[in-house]
Amino acid sequence: MKRDKLIKAYAPMTETAFYILLSLLEPRHGYGIMKHVEELTKGRIQLGSGTVYGTLTKMQRDGLIHVYSTKERKKMYQITVDGQHILKIEMHRLSELHSNAMKYGGDLL
């Protein structure tokens, strides 16, 4: 999928998609992704297997991730260059949101 179409399809990104791509900066299998996201969010987000594997299938089809290896019937996934590009765009968007929130609403904390 061309990058312009990827950006249109994934930006802004859902929190689930964001954390899955972030988790795949190093190779992980589905269960490893679920545990990593739970750990990163201190239990706030607990992804179900259907959500994870459905998202992985879509992301793999769109070229954001690829199968890194298959061991003992477990697929290990990793982010691709296109996936890193989309993740970077989302990180910049979130950084802008945070910056504006602190600048204009920081006194609400």
Image: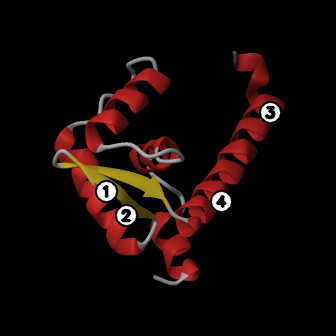
Q: Amino acid at mark 1?
A: Leu
Which residue position holds label 1?
56
User: What is the quadrant of residue 38 in the picture?
Assistant: top left
Q: Which residue is mark 2?
A: 59
The amino acid beneath tag 3 is: Tyr
Residue 73 vertical placement versus 47 (above, below): below
Q: Which residue is mark 3?
A: 104
- Mark pair 2, 3: CA separation: 35 Å
State the residue in front, 58 or 7. 58
Provide the residue designation for mark 4. Answer: 89
Give the residue at x 17% y 46%: 50
Q: Nearer the viewer, mark 4 or mark 2?
A: 2
- Left or right relative to 11: residue 97: right
Q: How many other residues sit within 10 Å of disc 2, few (<14), some (14-19) or many (≥20)?
A: many
| Residue in view at x 70 percent, y 18 percent | 108
Marks 3 and 4, how far apart in space? 23 Å
The first of marks 2 and 3 along the sequence is: 2
Query: Could you tell me which secondary element the residue under label 1 belongs to?
Result: helix
